Image (cartoon, rainbow, N blue to C red):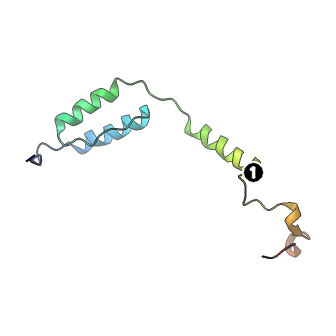
Amino acid sequence: MASTPKLVDRPTRRQLAYLRSLATRTGQTFAYPLTRREASREIQRLKQIQPSYIDNALIDREIADAIACGDADATRVRSTEIAGYGSTATWKERS
């Protein structure tokens, strides 16, 4: 029967935060370490991997543009759906 690690052996908060940071930067996942030693080994493994330089802001903009301009923009009000202008505008068809 496997024993649970003692409180002293568990990974530190700094180790876990650093692991999450490295995993995000490299685009990798990691198994939650049970001991400080496992956390250190996982940190060393992730440090060997080249960072994934994906610009998340660029990806978000591309997705937003694709949604706004494409068929996926189901929430946009089209000119064929309304009658009138400004405060007097109404839906042409009510469901």
Q: Is residue 19 left or right of residue 5?
A: right
Image: 44 above or below 74: above
Quick one: which residue is furthest to the right in this view?
84
Q: Is residue 37 left or right of residue 44?
A: left
- Residue 84 appears in which quarter of the rendering? bottom right
- Residue 91 appears in which quarter of the rendering? bottom right
Q: Position of residue 5 (x, y in %)?
A: 11, 46
Q: Residue type at mark 1?
A: Asp
Label 1: which secondary element: loop
- Residue 16 appears in which quarter of the rendering? top left
Q: 10 Å neighbourhood of mark 1: few (<14), some, or many (≥20)? A: few
Identity of the residue drawn at 23% across and 30% down: 41
User: Which quarter of the rendering shows the C terminus?
Assistant: bottom right
Q: Is residue 71 left or right of residue 53?
A: right
Pointer 1 residue: 71
All told, the count of numbered labels is 1
